[in-house]
Amino acid sequence: MNDQYDLIIIGGGPGGLTAGLYGARANLKTLVLERYIPGGQLANTELVEDYPGFESILGPDLGAKMEAHARSFGMEVITADVSTIRVDGDDRIVVTDDEEYKVKAVIVATGGSPVFLKVPGEKEFNGKGVSYCAICDGAFFRDQVIAVVGGGDAAVEEASFLTKFGSKVYIIHRRDSFRAQKIIQKRALDNPKLEVIWDTVVDEIVGREKVEKLKLRNIKTEKTRELDVGAIFVFIGFYPNTQILPDGIERDENDYIITDYRMQTAIPGIFAAGDVRQQLARQVTNAVGDGTTAAIAADKYIEELHDKAKAAVAAAS
């Protein structure tokens, strides 16, 4: 059992790295456990233009700067896949494939994952015309033809948003009606720049160095066609990475973690930050703010535990 750390942060995206920065600055022995590479979704984002202080910066570069900044204060990073978190009195046990860590506070910053189409070309053109975030990437496709896949609130809302940039926006939906709220549907269907392709799925994303066209198939008639586009935005679902959580942590109907204003979950000493947490927007700036609050709250929580332990010793003597 490894008990050399005060604070463990699970996930090395913007929220996790910011929490690591503030944890280390508070003189807590701080460890970030990240299963891939630090930076999280930034590693898959070609260009970031909405982070204060940078008119534009490559996503991987911003992630690397965040990591280096936090490491300069003593934060450590270990590549590891966390399988679960256990509660043992005032201790929080973080279990990986290779080790068990005993700490007083844990910040869960595991983010979320989009549901993928799983078609040829999707992985190859991720960041090169394939996107899962309209706010992040819409402005890169000004005056181009854009496709959106999906039929729920997110897909229809984001398609309306993308008409601010695209010359034409197609919504490709496998059914003959939307699941989105009626008011969201009306706003989209009344937009002259938006057109719906019903009963249709994407079979392949085609291009050379970037997305150039889609191969489509009508699931009722089996007829195929090609659609020339500059980008495809996929909104067929998004799920938070909450599989490691112990029982007792409250979540909403979509499995996002519910926290208080301190980012603390229903279990004291376990905090959450970033996309894994229930909130309105999921941007880098949100994650950074969450990580700041969570680390400061974790530091105060650990101090309270120490004070309680001292008081217990004093009372017993």
Image (cartoon, rainbow, N blue to C red):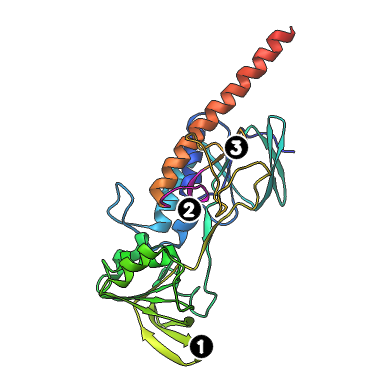
Q: Which residue is mark 3?
A: 266
Image quadrant in which you'd find residue 105 = top right
Q: Residue at x 57, y 23 (%)?
A: 303
* Span of residues in magenta: 273-282
Closer mark to the observer between disc 1 and disc 2: 1
Instruction: Count residues near mark 1 (Cα–Cα under 10 Å), then give few for <14, some for 14-19, many for 20+.
Output: few
- Estimate the spatial distance between the alpha carbons at disc 3 and disc 1, rounded to whole Å: 47 Å
Q: Which residue is mark 1?
A: 220
Locate residue 286 relative to residue 36 in the image: left or right.
left
Q: Which mark is residue 310?
A: none
Q: Which residue is mark 2?
A: 39
Looking at the image, the residue that sits furthest to the front is 182
Instruction: Count residues near mark 3 (Cα–Cα under 10 Å), then give few for <14, some for 14-19, many for 20+.
Output: some
Which amino acid, mark 1? Lys
Looking at the figure, which quarter contains the C terminus? top right
Secondary structure of residue under mark 3:
loop
Q: Are marks 3 and 1 in contact (CB under 8 Å)?
A: no
Closer mark to the observer between disc 2 and disc 3: 3
The answer to whether 113 is drawn above or below residue 269 in the figure is: below
The answer to whether 304 is drawn above or below residue 150 in the figure is: above
Locate residue 110 relative to residue 80 in the image: left or right.
left
Instruction: Count residues near mark 2 (Cα–Cα under 10 Å), then give few for <14, some for 14-19, many for 20+.
Output: many
Task: Judge by depth and name the residue closer to the eye, 263 or 11.
Answer: 263
Residue 93 image point, x, y percent: 70, 39
N-term-proximal mark, 3 vs 1: 1
